[in-house]
């Protein structure tokens, strides 16, 4: 089981993550949406497409743009559509 933890809270947990470039992408149903806050930030990957971001909010603390996902990935990355990955202090193990 792979988990993503930040500020003492389990943000996501799944035994079906997909690892791409060293990052675990969690299936949509495995992420606790109550900790996600939509962000206007985007970034572009040459082969995956445009990523959208979430900030994490746990116990009044915010981790800006700590999660990302691809709502409309390229064909090459279709298997991670809407899966969520984490960084910026989120402990994924």
Image: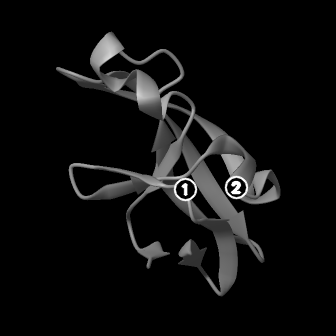
Mark closer to the observer (2, 1): 1
Query: Which of the colour schemes (rainbow, by chain, secondary structure, one colour) is used?
Result: one colour
Which residue is depicted at the point 44% across and 29% down?
A: 79
Q: Does residue 49 appear to the left or right of 12 in the view shown?
A: left
2 and 1 marks in contact (CB < 8 Å): yes
Of residue 11 and residue 65, the one placed in the foreground of this image is: 11
Residue 16 is marked as: 1
Which residue does the image show at 74% across and 47% down from the upper left? Answer: 29
**How many numbered circles does the render carry?**
2
The kind of secondary structure element at disc 2 is: helix
Residue at x-position 21% and y-position 49% = 21
Question: Regarding mark 1 in the picture, which secondary structure is present there?
Answer: loop
**Dot 2 corresponds to which residue?**
30
Q: Nearer the viewer, residue 64 or 78?
A: 78
Q: Is residue 21 above or below residue 78?
A: below
Say left or right for 39 vs 42: right
Image height check: is 16 above or below 51? Answer: below
Which of the 4 image quarters holds residue 42?
top left
- The mark that comes first in sequence, 2 or 1, is 1
């Amino acid at each position: 089981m792979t988990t993503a933890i930040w500020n003492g809270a389990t943000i996501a947990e799944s035994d079906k993550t997909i690892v791409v470039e060293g990052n675990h992408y969690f299936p949509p149903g495995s992420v606790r949406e109550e900790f996600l806050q939509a962000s206007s930030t985007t970034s572009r990957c040459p082969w995956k497409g445009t990523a959208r971001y979430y900030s994490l909010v746990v116990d009044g603390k915010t981790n800006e743009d700590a999660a990302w996902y691809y709502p409309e990935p390229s064909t090459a990355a279709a298997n991670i559509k809407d899966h969520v990955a984490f960084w910026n202090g989120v402990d994924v193990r």
